[in-house]
Amino acid sequence: MTTTRPPRPGAVPPPASRRLAWRPVVLGAVLFAGAGGLARVNTSASAEPSLTSNSTTPAGDVHAQVVALLDATRTGAPPEEAWRRLGPGAVPVLSALVVDPSAPAARRTLAVASLALVDPTSGATPIRAVLEDAKAPAEVRVSAAGALGRCLGLDAIPTLITRLQDPELQVREAVAVALGRLGGQQARQALEDRLPVEERALVREALQRGLTLVEP
């Protein structure tokens, strides 16, 4: 009968024993690496932004985004790029805000300028309507005077001429300058005709400024 002797201290185990010894270590490393790789894949998948989440924006969301963009703007109209990101759905929202008497005047003023920027063709009708609305706030109508010229060009002159007799001082001033910027003989004649009968000094100054802007 053969008796198995225990290994002597410091003895080197045979090759088979060494292979068996490192198997658990390798297996553990593989499992750890696999778990780590899976974790990284899951993390990357969760961090990857969705490319289709904003492909369609409900109308209510567009309205909220338009209002937020207008209210966040301090001076002038928001840049065209900002409106391009919102898409064509912003145009009807802006058109509605321009003529909405319940909207804050500052928001309506910016809506007028923005509408003339992003869609002057569609914007001409509501902008003309608010310019001719004597009940609309003066600051909104002042914005509309300049915006109508940007929408229609020389075709805006007849509407603007009628506003040279507007009861609002600020509107008459804005119209005088808008006519001067559009230029042409019709605008020049209207400014010259209004100058001697205008009683308010500030409006007369605006008429003079408009005449200096008219091209000869």
Image: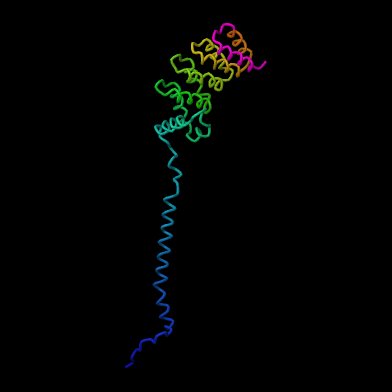
Residue at x 60%, y 11% (from the top left corner): 191
Residue at x 42%, y 67% (from the top left corner): 29
Q: Report the residue that reaches farthest toward the top.
A: 197
Camera-side residue of 62 and 74: 74
As drawn, 56 above or below 37: above
Quadrant (top left, top right, bottom left, bottom right) of the N terminus:
bottom left
Picture coordinates of residue 157, whole percent (x, y):
57, 15
Secondary structure mostly seen in the magenta stretch: helix
Picture coordinates of residue 49, whole percent (x, y):
45, 46
Picture coordinates of residue 69, whole percent (x, y):
46, 32
Q: Report the residue that reaches farthest toward the right.
A: 216
As drawn, 164 above or below 87: above
Q: Can residue 203 be found in the magenta stretch?
A: yes
Q: Can residue 106 be found in the magenta stretch?
A: no
Q: Which residues are magenta?
A: 196-216
Residue at x 52%, y 27% (from the top left corner): 119
Quadrant (top left, top right, bottom left, bottom right) of the C terminus:
top right
